[in-house]
Image: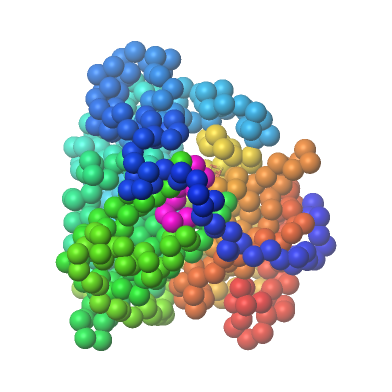
Amino acid sequence: MTTSADTREGAPVASSGRVRGPRKGTDLGQWKISGRTPLNHNEEFKAEENSLAVQQRIIEEYSRTGYASIPSDDVHGRFRWLGLYTQRKQGVEGANTSKLDAESLSDEYFMQRIRLDGGQLSTEQARVLGEISREFARGTADVSDRQNIQLHWIRIEDVPEIWRRLDEVGLTTLEACGDTPRVFLGSPVAGVEKNAVIDPSEELAALREEFIGNPEYVNLPRKFKTAITGSPTLDVVHEINDVSFVGVNHPELGPGYDLWVGGALSVAPRLGERLGAFVSRENVVPVWAGVCGIFRDYGYRKQRTKARLKFLLAEWGPEKFRQVLQDEYLGFELPDGPAPERAVGHSDHVGVHEQVDGNRYVGFALTAGRLSGDALVALADAAEAAGSRRIRLTPHQKVLVLDVPEDNVEGLIEAVQPLGLHAKPSPFRRSTIACTGIEFCKLAFVETKGLAARVIDDMEQRLTDVEILTPISLHINGCPNSCARIQTADIGLKGQYIGEEYVFQVHLGGGLASTDREEGGLGRTVRGLKVTADDLSDYVERVTRTFLGERQDDQSFAEW
Ligand code: SF4
């Protein structure tokens, strides 16, 4: 049921501009100004010890004594530094969430997030992950929209063995969650893409080497997200990261990066801003340290709802931010630089593409990011049979296989199709992403991934009479936190519980810079337009047909 007959009816409310800094005159908990006295419980337990101490405790104690023996600050707090979140107790409805505490909502199992910086996986690593999934995670393995793999149903007793196997193949879960430098998003086609502005592989490796587990940067006010790309398709959603390095050609200085800071979504979305500064290859590490250092030292630690870097940027503005970065953290001035230029090609990299060395990379769409342990093992086998050793995950919940000789491409495509991997997907299979939802997430109101799969199937059956040349993005969230980036989708859906009904609030017309639109923009909340899960396919079909019927020339969804 929709509460509005017209798909676009209702007063649009801009989603942008809602980010405001805390009230002036209050103690904001900024280390450089207020000192380091912890002003809330999270800050207290973060100050007490670091992730390595917790890791030892899991290995030596909790894995033997079991879930019930773990203190709350560890299980619901410090464990996140190791990528471990408690999983939602099965059968607890979303409406109860606000009335229950974390302990009541959790069962004794964990989600284990494995950080894959740049989405990089060797076939050997994919096989080990698949085997871990089959043995310890009931076969689960979801691809997140931050290039991670997420396992579910993990028991604390099995965590040391999982870490041992991951470590053997060079994988880690360190700082995969929590108030830390999360996984570094990186172009999944770095080093192989034709027409790339710059190959960021060395810079990404240096960031990993310098900063994962670096004690200077483990205790941040909130999570800190990084992205780096040299792709002209702008493929790392750079506008919604705390710091982003985007490949540009400086007219005098050559290839390097344009610096963006302060992007983030959640309930108070804000796109990142350019500082107008050019970052050379050798300055990526010090500039990252400076931006993260500003966040650590000046970030607002008193209220967690105001702690992301975007709030500080909203207060300072880009000019002051750049000045503080240069004066207090770098000790030198960054040259001015150009803005990134958009080029031909879709940033999800789905389909078959020629590499710089003449081989091909092949991008596959999943169904709303759902993979499995069996599929990971079979994908590794198929990639190797096609002559590849390299797999990549993308920030659009897609999977790429690199380095495929041209003659082996069709064989690979056929081999992985039964795994649910599509190189020529339908428009909605390609452009639908969904967050974890109520299946496992404690904050969710509604189910998401199964619903996304159903809507995709329905659109494939119903929209056979129309041609959708540019996929219409459909992003589905189980709650307002926006893990599936609803404000940056053509159609964004936010799970809510209103008036004793589970519904999706509709957002329309958002998008990020890619070939789909000139520049990123946040969608508008369509006031009064709520859709239930049962009516979602009807709604998506109706809005799609209306758009295709009304659009002028090649007008985009956002321009419509
Ligand atoms: Fe959970 Fe909400 Fe994030 Fe979905 S958007 S994964 S429901 S916190």
Q: Position of residue 159 (x, y in %)?
A: 32, 27
Quadrant where the image shows the C terminus: bottom right
Of 560 and 536, the residue lying toward us = 560
| Ligand 1 lies in quarter | top right
- Give the mark count: 0
Magenta stretch prevailing secondary structure: helix
Q: Quadrant of residue 361?
A: bottom left
Q: Residue at x 55, y 34 (%)?
A: 442
Check residue 282 for magenta coloring.
Answer: no
Q: Residue at x 77, y 57 (%)?
A: 528
Q: Residue at x 28, y 17 (%)?
A: 61
Q: Is residue 119 visible?
A: no
Horizontal side of 453 relative to 370 (left or right) equals right
Q: Quadrant of residue 81?
A: top left
Horizontal side of 140 relative to 556 (left or right) equals left
**Magenta span:** 303-312
Q: Quadrant of residue 341?
A: bottom left
Q: Is residue 549 visible?
A: yes
Q: Residue at x 31, y 58 (%)?
A: 291
Of 395 and 255, the residue lying toward us = 255
Check residue 308 for magenta coloring.
Answer: yes
Relative to 174, is 390 above or below? below
Q: Position of residue 536 (x, y in %)?
A: 70, 54
State the scheme by which the image is colored.
Answer: rainbow
Relative to 195, is 67 above or below? above
Q: Position of residue 299 (x, y in %)?
A: 39, 50
